[in-house]
Image (tube, rainbow, N blue to C red):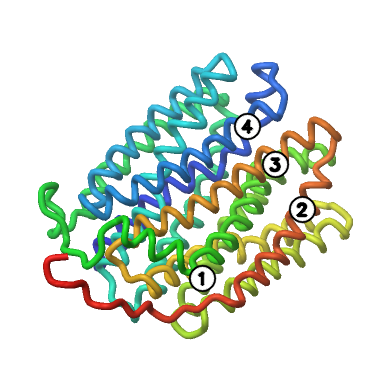
Amino acid sequence: MTQVLVCGAAIVTLSMGIRHGFGLWLQPITQSQGWNRETFAFAIAIQNLAWGVSGIFAGMLADRYGAFRVVVVGACLYALGLIGMASATTPLVFTVTAGVLIGMAQAGTTYAVIYGVIGRNVSADKRSWAMGVAAAAGSFGQFLMVPTEGFLISNLGWQEALMILGLASLMMIPLAWGLREPGFTGSTAVRREQTILQALTEAFKYPSFQLLMAGYFVCGFQVVFIGVHMPSYLRDKGLSPQVAGYALALIGLFNVFGTYAAGVLGQRLQKKSILAFIYLARAVVISVFLLAPLTPVSVYIFSSVMGLLWLSTVPPTNAAVAQIFGVAHLSMLSGFVFFSHQIGSFMGVWLGGYLYDRTGSYDVVWYIAIALGVLAALVNLPIKEKAIIRRPLAQGA
C-alpha cells in the first residue's frame, strides 16, 4: 500500500503541479504571438475537454491492464505536448499541443487512474484518507511548481521554461513502476462481477451518480476559471505578476491541508455533506473577495481560504463513487464523473476568455461562479451513499 501511495502521490504532484501553472503563460504567449486571450483560453478549454474524454478511456484501460502502462504513455504525451506548445506558431498547432496532447496526457497521469490503483490496494476503512493524501500531493505540486514555473519564465523565457517542464514530465515514467499490480499482466485481468456495459448502465441509471456529476461540473468551472484567468485579472487591476504567482502558490499550499482534511472527514462524515459545504463556502468566499477592496493582502487571504476548498471535492467525490459502486470499475466511473468536471472546466476557462474579449471584464464570469456554487451545494444534498446491493449474476451469465 505504501509504495502505491507514495508513487501515485508523486505522479500527481508532477502532473497537477505543471498543469496548475498554465495561467502564468497566458500573457507571455499572447503578447509574443499577437493572439487575443480567447485564443489561449480556447486551447486550455480544449485541454480540459480532451482530458475529460480521454479520462474515460484511460480509466477503462487502467481497470483492464493496470495503471503502469497508462501512466507511461501519459508521461510521454505530456513531454510531447509541452515541447510542442513551446514550438507552436499558429493557434491551430497551439490548440493541438497545449490542448489535445496535454489533455490526453493528464488523463493518464492524474486522479482517475491513480485513484483506481488506490481503491484496489487500500482497504475501505482507509480509502477516503488515502485519496485525500493523493489529492494533497497534487496540491503540494501546485505550491511547489507554480513559483518554479514563474521563476523559469522570468529568467529563461516562456519557451525555454516549457522545454524544461517537458523533460521534467518524463520523471513520471520511473515512478509508474511503483504502480504495477500483480493482478494485471496485460493478458489477464482481475475477475469482475459486471461487464463495462453493465457497470455503466447501473451507474447512469442511479440518480446519485448523476448528482455527483452535476456537482463536479461546478467544481471544474470554478477552479479552472480562477486558475487560468486570475493572474491576468490581477494584472488588469494593477497588481504585479508576483502577486499572481504567490496567490496560485498559496492556493496550492492551503489545498494540501484542505484535501487531506476532506479525505479524513470522509471517513467520519457523510460525503455529500462535505461536498455541499465546500461548494457553498466557495460561493461565499468569491462574493467576499469581489466586495472587498482589492489589495495584495486581500488576494493572499482569498487564495489561502480558497485553497482549503480548491481540490477538497476530489476525495469525497471519488470515495463516494467507490462506496456506492465498488472498486472493480472505479477508474472508469471516476473518469465519467471527471468528464463532467472537465466540461465545467471547458466552460469556465473559455467563457472567461470569450466574455473578457467581448466586455473587457471578468465580472460576469465571477457572478456565474457564485451562482453555480450555490446550485452545487443544493444538488449534493439528496445523494445516497449506501452501497448498491446487486442480485447475484446467474451462472454462466
Which residue is the site of mark 3?
A: 229
Where, by quadrant of the figure, is residue 170 drawn? top left
Identify the secondary structure beneath mark 1.
helix
Which circle, 2 or 3, is nearer the viewer?
2
Q: Earlier in the sequence, mark 1 or mark 4?
A: 4
CA gap, disc 2 and disc 4: 19 Å
Residue position marked by numbered label 1 in the rendering: 208
**Total of numbered circles in the picture?**
4
Instruction: Give the residue at x 59% y 63%.
Output: 215
Report helix, strand or loop for mark 2: helix
Closer to us: mark 1 or mark 2?
1
The x and y percentages for residue 126 are 35, 77
How crowded pointer 3 is (Cα within 10 Å; few <14, some 14-19, many 20+) is rated as: many
Could you say which disc has been placed on residue 42 in the image?
A: 4
At mark 3, the secondary structure is helix
Seen as rendered, the residue at the extreme bottom is 268
Q: CA distance from mark 1 to mark 4?
A: 31 Å
Kindly state the secondary structure of the residue where label 4 is placed. helix
